[in-house]
Image (cartoon, rainbow, N blue to C red):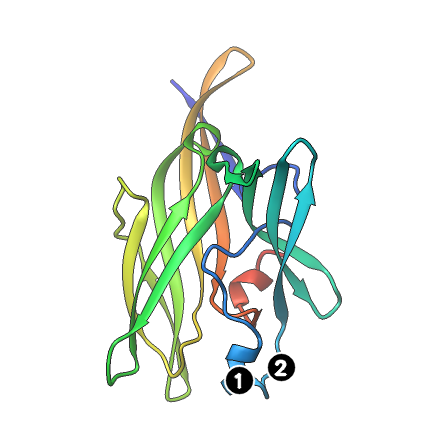
Amino acid sequence: MKKICFQISHFAIVGIICLIIIGCNGKSENQNAHNNEIEYEFERKMITYDFGNGITEDVELYIDKSNDTIGNQVFAYNEKVLDSSRSLFYDLNLKQIKNSNEYSGLIKYHFNPNREGKLVGFTFTVISKTTGKADFLSFDTYDSGKNQLEFKFKNNSDTLIGHIHAQHTMDTIVDDEEKLRFREIFISVDNYSKTNNPFTKGLR
């Protein structure tokens, strides 16, 4: 009988501290004009690591007021071509439903199954704010072939705050014993460069 090993990570690349990036072409600070008076906990910034020989990584960091950093997505490139075998990120599409405060979206999760294992669970949680009330809405019905899911929520602005919770399993052998590795990955999701994402706070 296989034993089960548990691993929990807020990003998938073990040994990299404070790394991850934007897979949704996040909107700039200037575009976030309606939130100018809000005090933000985090600012998202991209940083590039150049390892030579055409190998680079673009990394998204969540930076708090104390300049502490938390990693999120990682985009690895080989000669400027995306290397999905070393990357971990999401694609986000969000549209407002005409003449309403309702939004529909599609989020796609990118990972390397040879490293992370088989995807057995994919949940996206988003914060819905209307008339001063905040609700946490979770969506877990996903397309297992494309690793993506559709969602819909109401909000008093086009600001999206959420996170991905992915669950992976992989057969492995430890000390000549068959085991099943179970891994959880958490990725913060935002569409503006400044945010008060409570899920990011939980990753400290």
Which amino acid, mark 2? Answer: Glu
Q: Residue at x 43, y 70 (%)?
A: 160
Label 1–label 2 contact, CB within 8 A: no
> Up-down: is 109 above or below 127?
above
* Nearer to the camera, 10 or 86: 86
Q: Nearer the viewer, residue 69 or 120?
A: 69
- Residue 116 vertical placement versus 151 (above, below): above
Tell me the SS state at disc 1.
helix
Along the viewing direction, whichever of 89 and 115 lies nearer the viewer? 89
Measured in 3D between alpha carbons, the distance from the residue under mark 1 to the one under mark 2, in whole angstroms, is 13 Å
Quarter-of-image position of residue 54: top right
Residue ID at (60%, 48%): 58
Which corner quadrant of the image does residue 149 belong to? Answer: bottom left
Classify the position of the N terminus by image quarter. Answer: top left
Marks counted in the figure total: 2
Residue farthest toward the right in the current orientation of the protein: 66
| Residue 11 visible (yes or no) | no
Residue flagged by tag 1: what amino acid is it?
Ala
Q: Which of labels 1 and 2 is toward the front?
A: 1
Classify 10 Å Cα crowding around label 1: few (below 14), some (14-19), many (20 and above): few
In the depicted structure, whether residue 36 falls above or below residue 179: below
Give left or right: position of 65 versus 29.
right
Q: Identify the residue position indicated by label 1 in the image.
A: 33
Q: Earlier in the sequence, mark 1 or mark 2?
A: 1
Q: Is residue 178 visible?
A: yes
136 sits left or right of 96 in the view? right
Q: Quadrant of the C terminus?
A: bottom right
Which element type, helix, strand or loop, lies under badge 2? loop
Percent coordinates x, y for residue 199 in the rendering: 52, 62
Q: In the image, which disc is placed on residue 39?
A: 2
Identify the residue shown where x is 67% and y is 31%. Answer: 53
Residue 128: image tag = none
